[in-house]
Amino acid sequence: PLGQRGPPPGAAGDLAALAELDEAALLAGLRERFLQQHIYTDIGDILVAMNPFQPLPLYGREVSAAPPAAPRRPPAAHPSPPPLPRRSPSGTGASRP
C-alpha cells in the first residue's frame, strides 16, 4: 500500500522459525537472503533491513511519486514554572503583593 514502510507481511522470511537459532544460523540466513536480493528479514518481531548497495525494483511508481512524509515537529516546550513567592526582608517567609 501507499506509504508502506518495509516489506508486505510474510515477505521477510522469519529467521526465528529456524530449528537452531544461534549467531552462525542468523548470519547464514541473512547472507542467503541478501544474495537473493531479499533485503528485508524478520527475526521474531524485529525487522532487519540490509543495504543492497544497488537499486532494486522494490517499490512501484506510486510509492516513489508519493509526497515525502511530513517532517517531525520538535516536542512542544514545557511552560516555565510559576515564579517563587518573594520573601519579606525579615525572613519570616511572608509574601509581598
Image: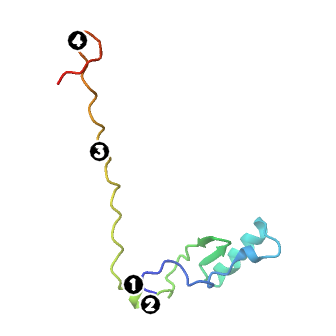
Q: Amino acid at mark 4?
A: Pro
* Front-lying residue, 24 or 75: 75
The residue drawn where x is 58% and y is 73% is 50
Numbered disc 2: secondary structure? loop
Q: Please tell me which of labels 4 and 1 falls first in the chain.
A: 1
| Residue 62 place in picture, x, y as percent | 39, 89
Q: Amino acid at mark 1?
A: Ser
The answer for how far apart the CA atoms under marks 4 and 2 are is 74 Å
Disc 2: CA contacts within 10 A as few (<14), some (14-19) or many (>=20):
few
- Would you name the residue on which mark 4 appears? 89
Instruction: Identify the residue under disc 3.
Output: 79
Of the image marks 4 and 2, the number of the one nearer the N terminus: 2
Q: Earlier in the sequence, mark 1 or mark 3?
A: 1
Relative placement, left or right, of 31 versus 96 is right
Q: Which residue is mark 2?
A: 60
Q: Can you identify the residue that label 1 sits on?
A: 64
Q: Nearer the viewer, mark 4 or mark 2?
A: 4
Of the residues shown, which amino acid type is indicated by label 2? Answer: Gly
Compute the Cα span from label 1 to label 2. 7 Å
In the displayed structure image, the side of residue 12 where residue 53 appears, left or right: left
Of all residues, the one furthest to the right in this rendering is 19
Secondary element type, mark 1: helix
Distance between the Cα atoms at labels 3 and 4? 29 Å
Q: Secondary structure at mark 3?
A: loop
Mark 4: secondary structure = loop
Quadrant the C terminus occupies = top left
Compared with 38, 90 (above or below) is: above
